[in-house]
Amino acid sequence: MIDTPRHQGLRNKLVIELKNKGISDAKVLSAIAAIPRHLLLESAFEPHAYQDKAFPIAAGQTISQPYTVAFQTGLLQVQKGDRILEIGTGSGYQAAIIHYLGGKVYTIERIKELYLKAKQNLSMINIRLKYMGYGDGYQGLPLYAPFDKIIVTAAAPYIPEALIQQLKPGGRLVIPVGKTTQEMKLIEKTEDGNIIESSHGLFRFVPMLKKKD
Ligand code: SAH
């Protein structure tokens, strides 16, 4: 598969659709216009790559809907050079969007097959993240902490304490919390270390997997 002017046209249409649905962050929209989502999906789903839908990737997991990716990215407020931890690499699409916006991306995936595939697909489109790991997101990434921003892209039953600890003062954590449906939570750590929590609507994600041991 390759990227073509036809794919670019479909991305431009997707951007208009997301604008109509209320996504207004120009930088986020420019990232959606730039990243070839079809190259991160199984080839069978290529015709659907630029619809605003979630799609199966492998191992029973899904690539998040573009609207959701745009919404979470907007809440994160990515600044150039931010160190950003993502829990749930999946297809690598969300990571590619953050990378495009100038974030230094550290990402963790719990399913080995997906970790390997995302690694391969991202290198194919010349996107080099700071770190891609096969591991358990509940632990965060202590070796590389602290982070300016943390984004969780699977449904968390609760907010893991490790993630709050690994957030810098002034940092932001965006995490969908809940069982059947999830409340999009934004956790802001103030400069003096206080925690401010706010809610940003209901979403539906695949569940965050428990650690094995
Ligand atoms: N950001 C992804 C969304 C993938 S769906 C994308 O843009 O495509 C959520 C992903 O989280 C799945 O790939 C799932 O395997 C992964 N995941 C689930 N539990 C996890 C955990 N405890 N640690 C790390 N990744 C996890």
Image (cartoon, grey):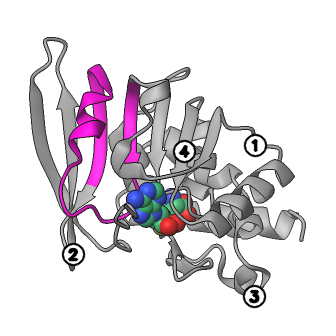
Q: How many marks?
A: 4
* Residue at the spot of label 3: 44
- Visible residue check, residue 68: no
Closer to the camera in the image, 11 or 45: 45
> CA gap, disc 3 to disc 1?
23 Å
> CA gap, disc 2 to disc 1?
32 Å
Q: Which residues are magenta?
A: 147-175
Q: Residue at x 67, y 37 (%)?
A: 129
Q: Residue at x 34, y 72 (%)?
A: 207
The local secondary structure at tag 4 comes to strand
Mark 2 or 1 closer to N-term? 1
Amino acid carrying label 2: it is Thr
Relative image position of residue 183 (x, y in whole percent)? 18, 62
Taking the magenta stretch, the answer to whether it contains residue 165 is: yes
CB atoms of marks 4 and 2 within 8 Å: no
* Residue at the spot of label 1: 127
Residue 192 lies in what quarter of the image? top left
Amino acid carrying label 4: it is Thr
* Residue at the spot of label 4: 107
Quadrant for the C terminus in the image: bottom left
> CA gap, disc 4 to disc 3?
26 Å
> CA gap, disc 4 to disc 2?
24 Å
* Residue at the spot of label 2: 181
The local secondary structure at tag 2 comes to loop
Q: Residues within 10 Å of mark 3 (few under 14, many from 20)?
A: few
Q: Residues within 10 Å of mark 1 (few under 14, many from 20)?
A: some
- Visible residue check, residue 185: yes
